[in-house]
Image (tube, grey):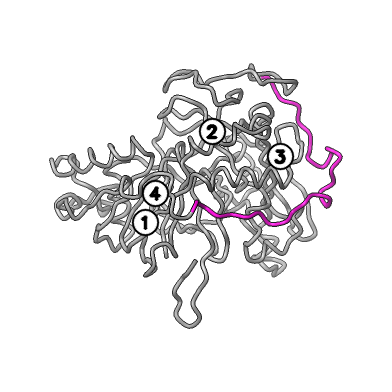
Amino acid sequence: MASARLAAALPGRALRRAPGARGPTAGARAGAPWPRLAPQGGGGSGSGAAWPRRSYVTTGLKDMEEDATPLQVKYWVEGKPAVPLDSIKVDLSKYNTEKIFSVYGGEDGATLLPDMDLAETQRLRAHMEDVFSRIGVVHLVNTGFTSTSQFNAATKVLMPNHMDYTGGANRRAPIEANVYDTGAPREADLQYHHEMAYVSTSCQWVAFGAIEATHNPIKGATFISENIGATNMLLCTTFGRKLVDKGMCYVRKLPDEKYFVDNDRDPSIVYNFWQTSTGCTDMWEAQEVMERKGLEVEWQNSAVFGRYMVTKYYVDTFEYDPFNDRNTLFASVADDYAWFDSWPGVQKLPHWERPLKLTFGDGEVINREQKQLWVDCYDTHGLPILWSKGDLAIICNYRTAHGRPRRRSLAGTGASWA
């Protein structure tokens, strides 16, 4: 299944990470200050004061001593989706899409747009909004769409404003304005994650469009996890309470693209270059981009990777979900080196050389058993989006996490299979 990603958010209402919002308890309304809960135990201050920080290599457990055995990822309990699949669908064959998508505008005057003055468009918007508001995902089927411009236009029926994808961890090639390739090799398992959880401002929603699809929909499915269920399951454990108390530290290592080009290095071992992530070629401008997103930045030299940009982001594991008026999970092992367990090229690196690392907020190592529990919480509450050609899904970045299993090509056909 080939898919295009539309990364987007409402300007001025993007999800902003809130220091101090540590726990799952409700206590804030949309538009009110973020909930600030006192941590239990000796974890630090719940009033927004700085948490004790130290590098994970100083905790007494050396990098090489960690159990880096690949995690078991299932994505869902087969045959038992977290919500009924039909409940997330909107059938576009019941709407006059030729009339709805008949307007061209934008800066160039050539961008396909929905005609929001039409009663038919408003009827479609109300239907999409009802499903999205109740469940956190809307899956458009029987669309007849064949281009990313149509995906973009359909997304604007529900979400008229988009954001630019900057500061991201992954290398994503833009297809057109606000439309990106998924930026991941089909051979890699993409574990459940919330988009851009590792920076201070994240998108409110993400949309996926199926340019092509497999004959067997489950073989090409994208999976989402219902976040309330995953949160509740995790909070029933000692590990979950520890995440409440200590928060998280995201560590990212971004190598120098110029070093790789000048030295003819193999880029397959690179997840993303700092130039690609920031859109800058000057290191100080790149650092400023990351610092504006709330990251701490330092520079290191490596014989393998050249001039490394190393970023650290200290934040809470749980963030306020305005739809459910409570704090829910907004972190996952997708931001740890475990993300690369099946990633071609990068998987060959020892885990301490991989570009991502996730620790507790005080630098304590998260062990393999805890990571597996985390994965299980998301998997238990998963459901597949079963693609047909032309389908579009818009998912809430608060109320769902998303991921997909690896694809395998059938020799000589170019077809992609799970």
Tell me if mark 2 has few (under 14), some (14-19) or many (20+) residues whose alpha carbon lies within 10 angstroms of its own: some
User: Residue drawn at (17%, 49%), measured in percent from left and top?
Assistant: 100
Upstream in sequence: badge 1 or badge 3: 1
Q: Do the residues labelled 4 and 1 touch (CB within 8 Å)?
A: yes
- The quadrant in which residue 141 appears is bottom left
Real-space Cα distance between discs 4 and 3?
29 Å
> Residue 151 appears at what percent x and percent y?
31, 54
User: Does the segment drawn in magenta span residue 143?
Assistant: no
The residue tagged 3 is: 359
The circle drawn on residue 209 is 1
Choose mark 2 or mark 4, whichever is in front: 2
The circle drawn on residue 168 is none
> Residue 97 appears at what percent x and percent y?
18, 53
Badge 2 amino acid = Asn
User: Residue drawn at (22%, 51%), measured in percent from left and top?
Assistant: 104
Real-space Cα distance between discs 3 and 2?
21 Å
Q: Is mark 4 on a helix, strand or loop?
A: strand
Closer to the camera, 111 or 223?
A: 223
Q: Are marks 1 and 3 in contact (CB under 8 Å)?
A: no
The residue tagged 2 is: 232
Position of 351 compared to 18: left or right? right
* Relative vertical location of residue 46 with respect to residue 55 in this rendering, above or below: above
Upstream in sequence: badge 4 or badge 3: 4
Badge 4 amino acid = Ala
Q: Dividing the image into 4 quarters, which one contains the N terminus? A: bottom left
Q: Are marks 1 and 2 in contact (CB under 8 Å)?
A: no
- The quadrant in which residue 205 appears is top left
> Residue 273 appears at what percent x and percent y?
63, 55
> Residue 349 appears at what percent x and percent y?
73, 61
Q: Is mark 3 on a helix, strand or loop?
A: strand
Q: What stretch is highlighted in magenta?
A: 49-77
The residue tagged 4 is: 207
